[in-house]
Structures are given as C-alpha cells and as structure tokens.
Amino acid sequence: MTSYATSTARSDLSELRRLKTLLPPELKSWVTIEASTAINPPLITSEEIGKDQVEVQVDLAKWDQFALDQRNLLFWHEVARIQNDTIPKDGWEMAALAIGLGGAVGELWVQDGLLLLLALALCGVSGWRLYQRNNGEKTLQEAIQADEKAISLATRFGYTLPNAYKSLGSALKVLIEQTPKKKQRRRFEARLDALKKSASKAKTQAKSARPEVY
C-alpha cells in the first residue's frame, strides 16, 4: 500500500513538472502549477495568489483519465486564459458587497444619509463587478477565445494544426460525457461547436494556400 502511494506521488510530481515545461518561457517565472487540494475541485483552474503570481491547480485524479495530447491542449487553454487576463482576480467584490450591505443597514439605523449613499454605491459597484464576472455569455466567449489561443500555443510547441484541433476537440468530448450538470455541459458543447467551425475555417484556408497539406 505504501509502495503504491509512493509511486502515485512520484507520478503526480512528474506530471506537474512536465506541465511546467509546457509553459511559454515568458510565463515560467510567475506561474506555478500545483495539485488541487480542494474537495471536488474543477479539472483545472487558475487563480491569483499574489501580485504578479498565478497558480494553476490540477485535479490529478481526474487529469489522469485524459490522454497526453488532450491534457496538453486543456493545459494550454488554461495558459491562454492567463495570457488573456481572464482568470479570477483577488475576489474583493464579495468582501466589498458584504461591507456595503452591512454599512447600509447600519446607516439606516443611525439615519446618516451621506454614509448610506456611500454604502449603497459600494454595493452597486461590487454587485456590478460580480455580475460581469459571472455573466454566462461573457465567460463563454472568453473560453472560446482561450481555445483559439490554445491551438496557437500547441503549434508553437510543435503540433500540426489538424492534430491540435483534434486533441482539444476530443478532450471537450470527454468533458461533455463526464459532466452531469446541464448548464456546464452546454458550455462545453458550445465550445466544441465553435472549435469545429474554427477548424473548418482553418482547413479551408489551408487548402486555398497549400492544397497538399490536407
């Protein structure tokens, strides 16, 4: 049992090191990769952990179910999100909203009109930022843009364009099959549809430029 656990730990560490080599050189100094320790975490996610420092967290138990090429493209999708600056920030909005609501209730009690307005303004700003962050259409478009950039990153690391599209497309199909929540599954389906359209467009352009490629 101990030997199996040791072997698994070594395998996990080896995968984290391998993923580190897939980072573009300009990201290696400020992006770290760690195994997720949360309960039922997403497959892969990123968050700011300090000024100019981002941590990519991977659920290695789920991660191991994907083929190597699928992992690479899913990882580059996350890298693209970092490059596009679309990962969650420090989360000040929830704290600000709580402070604003608490302040509004307190000022209602003491009947200070100016402070009440300031508290309501704080609620409004933080609430709007939370809405923007969680807007479904916006986050979907950001994910589709990250998919496009992941394809570009894959070609930068030696993938042919057709293989990059195939690897990411097959990874999205696995995610669709494994995702029980309808809303999240529809997001993966929308990303796959957008990827197919992009692949078709790229294929047409390649045929026009160099017919022998495909």
Image (spheres, grey):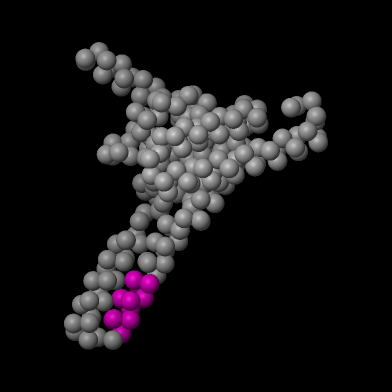
The answer to whether residue 48 is visible is yes
Q: Residue furthest left?
A: 109
Instruction: Examine the rendering and report whether any part of residue 85 can be seen.
Output: no
* Percent x, y of residue 85: 50, 50
Q: Nearer the viewer, residue 66 or 1?
A: 66
The reply, left or right, for residue 211 in relation to residue 66 is right
Query: Does the magenta portion include 121?
Result: yes
Answer above or below: position of 143 versus 155: below
Task: Name the outermost residue toward the top.
Answer: 3
Q: Residue 67 vs residue 39: left or right?
A: right
The N terminus appears in which quarter of the rendering?
top left
- Residue 170: x and y in percent read 53, 31
The range drawn in magenta is 114-124
The residue positioned 65% from the left and 31% from the top of the image is: 161
Majority secondary structure in the magenta region: helix
Specify whether 107 is left or right of 180.
left
Residue 160: x and y in percent read 65, 27
Q: Where residue 40 sits: x, y (%)?
A: 30, 38
